Image (cartoon, rainbow, N blue to C red):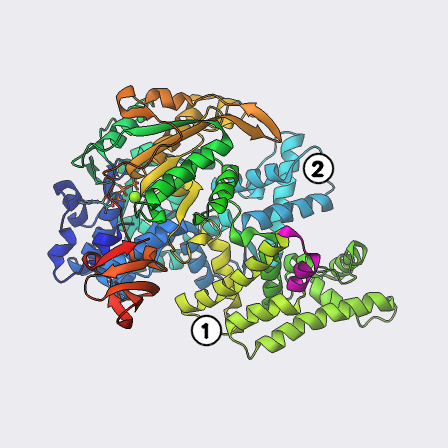
């Protein structure tokens, strides 16, 4: 995030790695290889320490970049970490294995697929695919939808897997459990037979592989002699196992984390892993950091006061040398529409003072809250980017095209086949599809193989055969044409030849305009993918592209960092920072979330202190994302399932001492002593004043190594390529 400093970091000397670090940070960076735990509060430089330790291991201890592996949780955080390491070391010297638990597991399983008992071309199932597969299996097993929802089975399967429990290891104690285990078993068999791997499976397979196969284990332990992990507080027991297996006896692990930011308890994460670290990795050195470099003192004081209401924590008090800063602002909206308008108005007041849109973030507890903001931002023409939520790659039209692509490379993939065989409609309805399925299962064929036989079977009705022949030929045609095309063109022809684009064009619905835009965007994504990966610009890149899409689905929008307001859930905001944060929906039942207050039907997690404490940590994570200004907003009335409902202020608001919190009116403006943070990406499309060349418009941006280079059309000097130097520019808007 901190571009200004980043662009100027040049490493000429080993000691520069330690520049600007405080003593404790330095102690952590230079510690002898061995188990090291850095526990510290938000914004105290944990990720910075991790990044610098990687550089230090390489430059000072002479460790090869190939011997280092660094792990974190979201793709966004992994990319951020990688680029920070590259800034320090240069592109070519940064370790290659910096990724998420899932991404790294996928890479290893592709390499050791045989030992792991997988086909080399296994397919990753994302959460939506997993759910629809489970629904389909339930239908086959005749499980009544009224009684059980696919979601329940999905949770059960994922929970079992994250506890390293296969279906065969479970012994059901009653009828209900029998059903769950039966579905789990059917699911496992199906995945096994069709080479499907879900997210949880990526981790479990890797753990099993390392546990069972001594050769592979020793090979990997030898290769990755140094393991580093960020956000350690959110590891669950399987992820800890994963780390332990990679570390082996060498025990050269660096973990950084903050138990106050543990927000994945519901997924089985154990902040206890932090407490047990010493016992698990003997000889652990612990370093605590307490100086915060991110937020103003006021924001920190407010956040500290809130988190103190949780017991069971190491007490630590964050402090900063930064200025006191403005008070935290609270806006009480009449309804959720006004809440969104308030946020938009404050942003506009900042933009009119040349603060870039990207300095603002809107964070919320639940995805659904984004809609109101999307609407108002759209109306006010405020550019914004939503992370997560209705993700680009989860949208129907995109998934359709991805299924076509899948079928091109894996004709025997039944999921993909079923998804597109009759979309757009081509006379192969559900009865016909049922026949294909029966034919296939009775002869142990895939749907594709079955169809190829059916079309030659003269006992089958002519129109059915004709329709099916058309479909098979269509897929073959896309593939044949694709042989000679660039990857972007392969996507474009798939979109047009399949008839998907025509389908949406002909319907003329309002929403179809967006769908067509999304399809066009997919083509852009493909072109970008080739540009950024080492993959060939041809049809051969379908598979790596599909892999990336499946793994990346949590935060895809991040592609081209344009100047836009950042909108996301609190969970996705972990580890990030923004000059101005709007933490919205600070209402009882939203934050804390209603599920943490009521016990759910299964009685799994009641209105217990644990889940309330987790909600508080989430609130704390949100507050500590803010560097200069924090706005909290809430609303007295919200729509809940089509009905107006009254909402009361969150109990967490009362936990912020009065002197740090001001209630503000609707026409609140951004504070006057706000210092904006400009990064070169924000400048695309802006008019600037250059110290030497005068006025111009920024039309392009590329990175030369770590230095951003702007293309600028100057009024008086023509088009020039100029190195981005903060001091040489003034932005006009
Ligand atoms: P979180 O708990 O949110 O993950 P963190 O502990 O990982 O936070 P970082 O993101 O590493 O914290 O650092 C927060 C900010 O402080 C960054 O902008 C970073 O550049 C800056 N920072 C870290 N250490 C220093 C330092 N010694 N001097 C100046 N700035 C620093
Ligand atoms: Mg961090």
Name the residue nearer the viewer: 236 or 256. Answer: 256
Left or right, residue 395 beside residue 612 = right
Q: Is residue 572 magenta?
A: no
Q: Is residue 662 above or below residue 163?
A: above
- Label 2 vs 1, first from the N-terminus: 2
Q: In the rendered image, which residue does mark 2 sit on?
A: 145
Q: Seen in the image, is 378 located left or right of residue 146?
A: left
Mark 2 neighbour class, 10 Å CA radius: few under 14, some 14 to 19, many 20 or more: few
Q: Is residue 399 visible?
A: no
Q: Is mark 2 within 8 Å of ligand 1?
A: no
Task: Kindly report the distance in space between the C-alpha atoms of the residues bearing marks 2 and 1.
Answer: 45 Å
Q: What's the magenta bit mostly, secondary-structure-wise?
A: helix
Q: Position of residue 651 (x, y in %)?
A: 41, 21
The span shown in magenta is 500-510
Residue, disc 1: 536
- Badge 2 marks a residue whose secondary structure is loop
Q: Quadrant of ligand 2?
A: top left
> Is 506 covered by the magenta stretch?
yes
Which residue is painted at 39% across and 59% down in the image? 215
In this picture, is 71 found above or below 178? below
Left or right of 328? Residue 518 is right
Dot 2 and dot 1 residues touching (CB under 8 Å): no
């Amino acid at each position: 995030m901190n571009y200004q400093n980043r662009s100027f970091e040049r490493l000429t000397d080993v000691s520069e790695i330690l520049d600007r670090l405080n003593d404790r940070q330095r102690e952590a960076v230079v510690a002898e290889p061995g188990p090291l735990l850095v526990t510290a509060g938000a914004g105290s430089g944990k990720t910075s320490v991790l990044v610098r330790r990687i550089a230090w291991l390489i430059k000072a201890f002479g460790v090869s970049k190939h011997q280092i592996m660094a792990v974190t949780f979201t793709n966004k955080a992994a990319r951020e970490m990688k680029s920070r390491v590259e800034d320090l070391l240069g592109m070519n010297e940064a370790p290659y294995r910096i990724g998420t638990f899932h991404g790294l597991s996928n890479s290893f399983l592709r390499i050791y697929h045989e030992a792991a008992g997988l086909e080399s071309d296994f397919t990753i199932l994302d959460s939506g695919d997993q759910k629809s597969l489970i629904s389909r299996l339930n239908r086959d097993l005749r499980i009544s939808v009224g009684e059980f929802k696919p979601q329940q089975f999905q949770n059960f399967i994922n929970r079992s897997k994250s506890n390293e429990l296969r279906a065969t290891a479970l012994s059901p104690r009653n009828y209900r459990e029998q059903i769950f285990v039966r579905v789990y078993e059917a699911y496992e068999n199906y995945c096994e037979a069709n080479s499907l791997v879900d997210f949880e499976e990526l981790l479990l397979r890797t753990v099993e592989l390392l546990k069972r196969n001594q050769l592979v284990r020793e090979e990997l332990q030898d290769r990755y002699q140094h393991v580093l992990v960020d956000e350690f507080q959110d590891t669950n027991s399987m992820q800890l196992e994963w780390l332990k297996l990679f570390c082996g006896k060498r025990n050269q692990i660096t973990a950084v984390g903050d138990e106050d930011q543990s927000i994945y308890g519901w997924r089985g994460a154990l902040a206890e892993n932090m407490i047990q670290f010493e016992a698990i990795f003997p000889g652990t050195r612990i370093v605590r950091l307490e100086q915060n470099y991110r937020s103003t003192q006021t924001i920190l004081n407010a956040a500290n006061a809130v988190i103190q209401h949780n017991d069971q924590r190491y007490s630590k008090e964050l402090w900063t040398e930064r200025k006191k800063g403005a008070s935290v602002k609270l806006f009480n909206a009449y309804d959720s529409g006004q809440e969104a308008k308030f946020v938009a108005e404050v942003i506009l007041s900042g933009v009119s003072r040349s603060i870039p849109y990207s300095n603002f973030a809107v964070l919320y507890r639940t995805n659904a809250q984004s809609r109101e903001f999307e609407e108002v931002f759209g109306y006010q023409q405020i550019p914004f980017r939503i992370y997560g939520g209705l993700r680009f790659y989860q949208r129907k039209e995109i998934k359709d095209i991805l299924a076509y692509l899948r079928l091109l490379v894996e004709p025997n993939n039944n999921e993909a086949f079923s998804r597109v065989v009759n979309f757009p409609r081509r006379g192969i309805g559900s009865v016909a599809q049922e026949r294909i399925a029966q034919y296939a299962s009775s002869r142990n064929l895939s749907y594709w193989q079955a169809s190829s036989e059916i079309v030659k079977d003269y006992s089958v009705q002519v129109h059915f055969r004709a329709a099916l022949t058309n479909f098979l030929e269509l897929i073959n045609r896309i593939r044949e044409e694709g042989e000679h095309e660039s990857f972007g063109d392969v996507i474009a022809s798939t979109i047009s030849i399949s008839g998907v684009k025509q389908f949406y064009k002909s319907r003329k619905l309002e929403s179809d305009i967006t769908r067509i835009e999304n399809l066009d965007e997919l083509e852009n994504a493909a072109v970008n993918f080739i540009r950024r990966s080492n993959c060939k610009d041809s049809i051969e890149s379908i598979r790596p592209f599909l892999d990336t899409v499946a793994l990346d689905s949590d935060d895809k929008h991040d592609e081209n960092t344009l100047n836009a307001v950042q909108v996301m859930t609190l969970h996705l905001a972990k580890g990030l920072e923004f000059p101005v944060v709007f933490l919205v929906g600070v209402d009882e039942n939203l934050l804390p979330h209603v599920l943490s207050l009521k016990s759910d039907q299964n009685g799994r997690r009641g209105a217990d202190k644990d889940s309330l404490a987790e909600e508080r940590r989430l609130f704390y994570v949100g507050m500590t994302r803010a560097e200069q200004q924090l706005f909290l907003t809430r609303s007295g009335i919200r729509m809940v399932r089509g009905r107006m409902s009254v909402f009361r202020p969150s109990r967490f608001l009362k936990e912020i001492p009065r002197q740090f919190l001001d209630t503000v009116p609707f026409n609140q403006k951004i504070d006057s002593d706000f210092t904006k943070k400009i990064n070169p990406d924000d400048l695309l499309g802006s008019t600037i004043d250059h110290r030497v060349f005068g006025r111009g418009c920024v039309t392009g941006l590329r990175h030369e190594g770590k230095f951003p280079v702007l293309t600028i059309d100057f009024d008086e000097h023509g088009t020039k390529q100029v190195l981005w130097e903060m001091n040489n520019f003034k932005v006009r808007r």
